[in-house]
Amino acid sequence: MDHRPIHLHSMLVHAVVALAPLAAVAFVLEASSSIVAGIDAAVWSFLFRGSLIGMLLLSIPAVLTGITERNHMYVNWPTSHRVKLVASMALFALVAWEVGVVAVHTTPLDLGSPLAVAVIVGNNLAVLVLAIYGLRITLGRCSLAPTSYTPDMDRDPPVDLLELVAESAAEPAKLIEVREEGR
């Protein structure tokens, strides 16, 4: 069977999804010089900049693994995959711009600046689109849209996968007697 026990794409995208709201919250708390639970603006500054750099660095392998791990399954990419690729590229470009702005930024952060809109709204909107389409692709039953998946036993006539696999198996299946296994 050709299967990968580790799906790098899934692991990488979860980190990017987690860093976007963290960057937004850290931006707001740094810009407002807030102290929450003893955490001051210097720590919020570190979390904000670290989140942006983490998103930028992780988004590259996240996109590449998304293409390579799933590309073999589709002859033509459906619209959902193209939307995800465009949203990923938009998020990458936005975060790259934000990192550039922060790198040359010398004045305190301003909640009314274009940087604030990009970090608080732009990043999280791109992540929301990616999450919606990601769920739609992988777990249609969890999204708002219906999926094309039909359980095998609901087909007409029902499909027994074990019978299909047994036809191509080189050796018969090994039966295990559970009650005798512990002896």
Image (tube, rainbow, N blue to C red):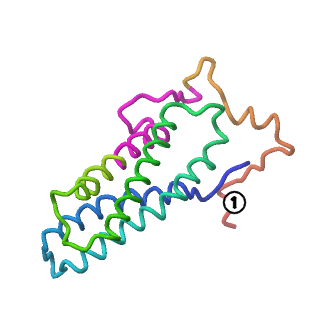
Q: Residue at x 43, y 44 (%)?
A: 87
The amino acid sitting under disc 1 is Glu
Q: Is 167 on the left-hand or right-hand side of 96?
A: right
Where does label 1 land, which residue? 180
Q: Residue at x 51, y 27 (%)?
A: 148
Q: Determine the residue positioned at 23% across, 80% down.
A: 42
Q: Quadrant of residue 109?
A: bottom left
- Specify start and end residues of the magenta stretch as a single range: 127-153
Q: Residue furthest top?
A: 156
Above or below — where is 162 with respect to 40?
A: above
* Image vertical order of residue 69 relative to residue 153, above or below: below
Instruction: Based on the picture, tell me whether residue 63 belongs to the magenta stretch.
Output: no
Where is residue 117? Give x, y as percent: 23, 53
Residue 86: percent from left, percent from top:
46, 42
Q: Secondary structure at mark 1?
A: helix
Q: Position of residue 51 (x, y in %)?
A: 36, 67
Q: Nearer the viewer, residue 122 or 178?
A: 122
